Amino acid sequence: MNIQQIIREQHLGLLFQQGSFGLEKESQRVYADGSVVTTPHPSLFGSRAYHPYIQTDFAESQLELITPPNKKLEDSLRWLSAIHEVVLRSLPEDEYVFPLSMPAGLPAPEHIKVAQLEDQQDVAYREHLVNVYGKNKQMVSGIHYNFQLDPDLIHTLFKWQPRFQSAVEFQNNLYLKLAKNFLRYQWILTYLLGAAPVVQDNYFKNGSPLKTGQYVRSLRSSQYGYVNAPEIKVSFDSLEAYANDLEHWVKSGKLIAEKEFYSNVRLRGGKKARELLQNGIQYLEFRLFDLNPFEPYGINLKDAQFIHDFILLMIWLEETADQQAVELGKEKLFTVALENPLAETQFRPEGEYILQQLITMLEDIGVESARIIYAKEKLAQLADPSKTLCGRLVHAIEDDGCYQQFGAKLAQRYKQQAFERFYALSAFDNMELSTQALLFDLIQKGIKTEILDENDQFLSLQFGDHLEYVKNGNMTSHDSYISPLIMENKVVTKKVLAKAGFNVPQSVEFRSIESAVANYPLFENKAVVIKPKSTNYGLGITIFQQGVQNKEDFAKAIEIAFREDKEIMVEDYLVGTEYRFFVLGDNTLAVLLRVPANVIGDGKHSVTELVAMKNDHPLRGDGSRTPLKKIALGDIEQLQLKEQGLTVDSIPAEGQLVQLRANSNISTGGDSIDMTDEMHPSYKQLAVGISKAMGAAVCGVDLIIPDLKKPAEPNLQSWGVIEANFNPMMMMHIFPYQGKSRRLTQHVIKMLFPEMP
């Protein structure tokens, strides 16, 4: 039985499509004019000795961005996007990432510095490559596409086939079939996705072999790319022959190591090829692909999925290429790579036959219609080369008038795009901003990160053998279990803090609306805060700064609080300014003044219109995926307006401050102002003590302070504790409305991994 037959008869179409995917993207760092930089690899990215995401390939200027393996191709593209954004925002202001495979503005060879890695053997290997190939050829960049078949698929196919007795031998044979057929038909992918039509003359040692104005499909995939000498031939007919040939070339000195064999397919699963005989080929690395300059990250999801479908076809095909066919495939690749990208390929009939087979396979295994439609679009491109990637690219270069200028313009555009929402990682924008900020720093510093549950913001972090888990950006194993239980209950929080000797305002608790309203006379004309017992983010809180004057307003505030909890508190209002202290361990790292939601009148617009205008600010949104929250005009805001003699339709005078909330939470539309350097140290130390009383390693402490410059005194006239918060927001300190950014996520990482350099 052949593979195709087994998949059909055993209904394995869905399992056949499963696998693991990883991408590696090489790119040159360049200046604004597109010329390659001569600066060292940025120190912000830490040591390349362990960095899982950001490496250098050949030269100090040549970035290599590596995604973790993912079960979904979409996730690999998301990781590539995130790593790319981290890089672009971390580079010096005058550096960019070149979006094309062939370098432009190459420095003189003596100014191209090979990657200065900690392992001197790696440096020596690169110096050897300089002697054999020269520096310029190694400055070419591309995308490597790593793919592993689902182990369950391999196991199931092995069970239903009669030929092989050894599971490892079957697995090796399956991957070899894939590799050989891919090498035979790889030219089709270069025809469709090649994007290296030209390079500047100084790339070549002895002058360009191309005629003036000549374009080709892919210099990178041609004999002028980074390829071995023609005599280096390695057989894929069997794994034994493959290992024998590699060992022969290394022993003869023609290759310094097996990794110097630059096939467009590499067999992966061991440091040496011979290990694969015992352990089995684990996955394949496809090295064929040019950077797509029209995509910010060098490849898009549709093309990545098409490549996956093409790879699957190489297994689906009934025939298996032999070594002679592999060599024929290489010849056809070199021919197609140097064809005019606007002319039909001479191998069009074969290409159409293979892509028809691909479409039939996709229909047989029941993929979504979009993939079939895209495959048909690719098929049509064999008749119309102007629609291929390189065909489009040639027109774009012609429109710009210069290859380097075209690349430089795109490089600048993509960097600008990366800063449009500088506070977020666009690929993980459904996560909280604090978690996104932490993820940014983890990628930048090189801590291996796994997203265990994206919706629940749960991450696994690993540095060496040290493993940590983090939820919501700063919930870690360093906190005791009881801490969040204390802090989510405001009544218990106050009692614990009072026992520890901290100043807390007096309060009364109620369990029903009726009992609370019946006690109205206790609070009449008094300044009070009405709030739920166990909520956070300022929900359900009403503040009567001028004193409670109206029983109906009091009852309304009580009702609002009970919407959020079964028990509420009516608490004395403390005179002063509220500040949020962010405490980690023994230090207060940030202090924030949170200005309650407000608008400033202009004498022309109503309160409703002023709110809409303020909400139009690009940093305002839902408050979890933007640094600032849009201001609402709900019941609480309208009560606050009523206290000022206003309604939503009032037109405030020019310069008039209109308070829309009395509580200062950012989550209810407030503004954030960093006051860390202005705050007297005594209050910072108080916040640390309060955090320790809560048993928390990370804590947000809210203090009311009349004068932040005067040292703290042991009475409520000097200061008072309003709340202690577990899992405090970090984004409002990292992205304040005004003042200095405090990158708290870096301190969380240092707490978790003190051994990191």
Image (cartoon, rainbow, N blue to C red):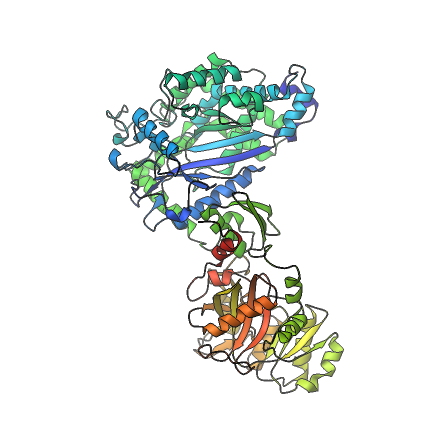
Residue 625 visible, this orientation: yes
Where 442 falls versus 164 (above or below)?
below
Q: Nearer the viewer, residue 483 or 650?
A: 483
Residue 233 visible, this orientation: no
| Residue 210: quadrant of the picture | top left
Classify the position of the N terminus by image quarter.
Answer: top right
Residue under the point 30% across and 38% down: 404
Residue under the point 35% across and 37% down: 115
Q: Nearer the viewer, residue 316 or 123?
A: 123
Locate residue 740, reporting x and y percent: 41, 64
Locate residue 527, reporting x and y percent: 60, 83
Locate residue 751, reporting x and y percent: 52, 55
Residue under the point 41% across and 27% down: 385
Q: Nearer the viewer, residue 312 or 46?
A: 46
Where 377 falls versus 81 (above or below)?
above
| Residue 479: quadrant of the picture | bottom right
Where 314 falls versus 511 (above or below)?
above
Taking the image as shown, residue 515 lies to the left or right of residue 449, namely right
